[in-house]
Image (cartoon, rainbow, N blue to C red):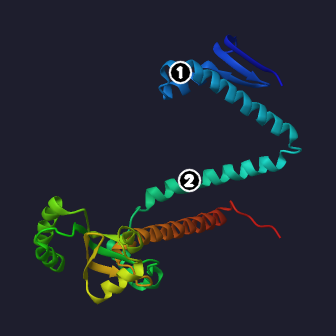
Amino acid sequence: MLFLVSCHKEAPQDNRVLLAEVGTSKLYKDEVDLMLAANDYGSDSARFVDDYLEHWAMEELYQHLAARNVASTAEIDKMVESYRKSLILNLYQEGLVNQHLKSSVSEADIKEFYELNKVLFDSDENMMKGILLVLPAKAPSLNKVRKWCIDMTPEAMESMEAYSAENAVQYDYFMDDWRSIEDLVKRLPLTEGQLLDRLSKKSTIEFKEDGQLYFVCADTIIRQGDTMPIELVSAEINELLVNSRKAEFIKAKKIELYNDAKLNGDVKFYK
């Protein structure tokens, strides 16, 4: 296999600067320049060119070796043609769907699907919304902290946030965001089962460990097997409905095209 490298060899047919050849494959300077332009190599540009030429030559040699050792390319040609057809079809369908269908569905449709299919949305983990607060054992105004945890009003949360900024070892507010309890207990001297057991008795728990006070204030808990709230699954439902409508639209389009073609004589069947 012939491999030639020349920094200033001209290709007479189009005046492009030829840098390398492997058999019938050629690499031109303008192609390498595009790679250089896309990245800032600075003083390493010469090294990059050398490495790129070597890599290109290796890949081409390997490709030629593979081509010589494949007995027949008929199957490859068949696969390429099949892929080409699929690519054309997918691009056409994508444009057709984007033109005629919305990429989202109404909240009413999402809610209706959710209510009719709640069995599909059982949680596979324990989750909760709430607050995690870790304080030094001798932190001040602990009775206020306990009251804020129980109240959980916006005013109480503001007071707790200000208090935590000065006193907390850890403060995590996730009243608006579902958290995995499995992940939460990684920051607690409790197992997941122990935490859930304590939270089943009251929504706010407090315990002391290694000179620190831990407060876990639960607003809402979802246990494994419970139906997840709609807010957690609305994006998934939207995708399900959009994909379903796409499939129905494409199916109807194919039937319409087929019926029209039969009427026009573009489709004929022979016994």
At horizontal 67% and vertical 18% (from top left) the residue drawn is 19
How many labels, in total? 2
Callout 2, which amino acid? Tyr
At horizontal 26% and vertical 69% (from top left) the residue drawn is 211
Q: Residue furthest bottom?
A: 201
**Is 242 left or right of 204, judged from the image as shown?**
right
Quadrant where the N terminus is found in the figure: top right
At horizontal 81% and vertical 39% (from top left) the residue drawn is 66
- Kind of element beneath mark 1: helix
Disc on res. 92? 2
- Kind of element beneath mark 2: helix
**Is 159 left or right of 53, judged from the image as shown?**
left
Q: Position of residue 14 (x, y in %)?
A: 65, 15
Q: Looking at the image, is mark 1 or mark 2 earlier in the sequence?
A: 1
Q: Position of residue 123 (x, y in %)?
A: 44, 79
Residue 30 visible in the snapshot: no
At horizontal 68% and vertical 11% (from top left) the residue drawn is 10
Residue 2 visible in the snapshot: yes
Callout 1, which amino acid? Asp
Query: In the picture shown, does residue 101 fall above or below 222?
Result: above
Picture quadrant where residue 113 is located:
bottom left
Foreground mark, 1 or 2? 1
Q: Position of residue 50 (x, y in %)?
A: 64, 21
Disc on res. 44? 1
Q: Residue furthest right?
A: 71
Disc on res. 193? none
Quadrant where the C terminus is found in the figure: bottom right
| Mark-to-mark CA distance, 1 and 2 | 44 Å
Name the foreground residue: 101 vs 235: 235
Crowd around label 2: few <14 · some 14–19 · many ≥20 (10 Å): few
**Is 72 left or right of 43, judged from the image as shown?**
right
